[in-house]
Amino acid sequence: MCGIAGYVGKKEVPPLILDMLKKLEYRGYDSAGMSILSPKKLSVIKCKGKISDLKKIAKLRKTDGSLSIGHTRWATHGKPSRRNAHPHLDCSKRISVVHNGIIENFKELKDKLVSEGCKFSSDTDTEVIAHLISRFYKYKGDLAGAVRKALKELKGSYALGVISLDEPDRIVACRRDSSLVIGVGKNENFIVSDIAAILNHTSRVIYLKDGEVAAVTKDTIDITDLCGRKVSRKVDKVSYNIKEAQLGEFPHFMLKEIHEQPRVFSRIMAHYTLPSGNIRFEGLNLTKKYFRGLDNITIVACGTAFHAGLAGKYILESYLRIPVTVDLG
């Protein structure tokens, strides 16, 4: 899991993006980076290591601008290194991409792009996206349109932030099976993986849905589907308490999450438990007939969720009397 942060407005972006990325640290990462766009220059700063390391590099580079995308990476394709850290560029170094997710067909796409003359600078699946967008941008001259075309080639999950030196007033954002939220401000807008990273700046958000593409400037947010048809999305007001996302008295997020488990579990149970004591599963339409037809259950999880799945295996088997397997995935 990794984090995406983006800003377009009037503020100087290096400190702002660094602060947003800092608030996404709890998601885990092994490298970090950001692209900063001014009207005549696209600068990329990235490193293996912590956001504090990125901050030192940004201070030395003294790069300014009022539009930026940033990223914290947890390695999937390609080892943790500066060359594999996001953002990634196309061959012309005019388009920059940050990505959360996994592109399942990246190898075949990469082979095709290499045969067409593209030169890759990393081992990541994300760089494929940058080259694809660049290829379509040459024909369309429209960043959002090029992104829509590129997305139709991809198999897998993604949340994307895309910027171009040729359209220095906007970020194009999109998602499928990976979280991405637009923060709505006054003469400024944001994109972010988690609302907690922007609560210091705005409590007004738009939740993008799967397959939607947003062109975000400081004053406008234009959302379309993959066919280019306009989509209307309401702006929601968030009542989330920012203190819940901060470390508070704890030295690190792992210990904080451990202490939060009883409260989180109680909230979940309260939400799904009816006054009668029965459990409701909203939107799943699970019936008694369906449950009676089950002959096995498979739990797929990773990280701490895998250990929760192992505990759940014994609970489910003791009540349901059917085999439960837990796969690490």
Image: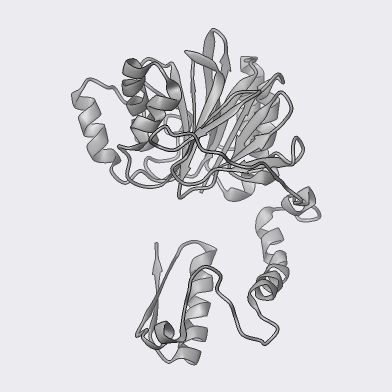
Residue 50: horizontal and vertical position, in percent?
60, 37
User: Taking the image as drawn, is residue 124 in sight?
Assistant: no
Residue 232 or 136: which is nearer the viewer?
A: 232
> At which x and y percent is residue 304?
54, 64
- Residue 36 image-quadrant placement: top right
* Residue 233 showing in the rendered view: yes
Which quadrant of the figure has residue 268? bottom right
- Seen from this angle, which residue lies furthest top? 40
Quarter of the picture containing the C terminus is bottom left
Name the foreground residue: 202 vs 304: 202
Left/right of residue 128 with respect to residue 70 in the rendered view: left
Q: Residue at x 62, y 15 (%)?
A: 63
Q: Is residue 195 above or below residue 61?
A: below
87 vs 297, left or right, is right
**Residue 232 located left or right of residue 294:** right
**Residue 292 picture location, percent across and down:** 40, 88
**Residue located at (52% from left, 78% from top):** 311
Q: How many marks?
A: 0
Q: Position of residue 186 (x, y in %)?
A: 74, 27
Q: Coloured how?
A: one colour
Q: What residue do we see at 76% from left, 51% from top?
A: 239
